[in-house]
Image: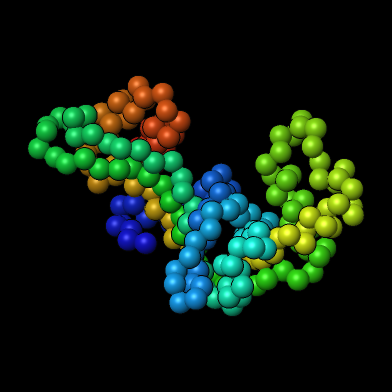
Amino acid sequence: MYIPNDFKVTDESVTYGIINEHSFATLFSQHNGRPVATHLPLLLSKENTHLYGHFARPNPQWKEIENQTVLAVFHGPHCYVSPSWYETNQAVPTWNYVSVHVYGEVELIKDENELIGSLHEMVSKYEAPDGSYRLQDVDAKFLAGMSKGVQGFKIKINHIEGKAKLSQNHSLQRQERVINHLQQIPNTDEQRIASLMKENLKK
């Protein structure tokens, strides 16, 4: 990923936070000599050493993926920035965004207990704490049958790149103008980018 110095995320806790908050990722690998991608949730291990996920078994991407170096892209908030918000119109539009790229090697999960454990972790992450659904309440035979329809895997993390493009290459005055305009837009991404820009100004 091309990352100018102004936009580079150097704090590992920030990159891990982006992965955890925006865990629905795009996983790229090679299959039959071509690049392929699947959109799927990936969970970061407690030790921050691996990503866990699973493919639907009919998805051919997993069949050649073991031991490949793959790329997982985590997409954070993003939004358009208009030059009309600046103090001058002698500028061009841009896009502010946050993204993390993770590179690593894939190992297929062959142990059923490890697979079921990763599925429990995933449900636990996304279900509301007061929700009525719990995977442990599902009949064990039914769950075992369903698990045969997926191929679990883990990615040993070799390298992480984080990028937060938040108008840091512009003047303080211009950044504040962008924040003010974004705060007037009710969309979630614009509000989140405005909040991140404000946090960045305090550093």
Work out which residue is located at the far left of the displayed protein and give it.
90
Nearer-the-camera pick, 55 or 203? 55
Work out which residue is located at the far front of the displayed protein and give it.
58
| Image x and y of residue 94, in percent | 25, 43
| Image x and y of residue 161, in percent | 44, 60
Instruction: Tell whether 74 sits left or right of 87.
Output: right
Q: Is residue 168 above or below residue 8?
A: above
Q: Quadrant of residue 33?
A: bottom left
Residue 47 visible: no
| Image x and y of residue 142, in percent | 86, 52
Q: Residue at x 33, y 58 (%)?
A: 3
| Number of numbered discs visible in the structure rendering | 0
Q: Quadrant of residue 110?
A: bottom right
Q: Is residue 93 above or below residue 161?
A: above
Colour theme: rainbow
Question: Which quarter of the figure is the N terminus placed in?
Answer: bottom left
| Image x and y of residue 56, in percent | 66, 59
Q: Residue at x 90, y 54 (%)?
A: 141
Q: Residue at x 50, y 69 (%)?
A: 29
Q: Is residue 182 above or below residue 39?
A: above
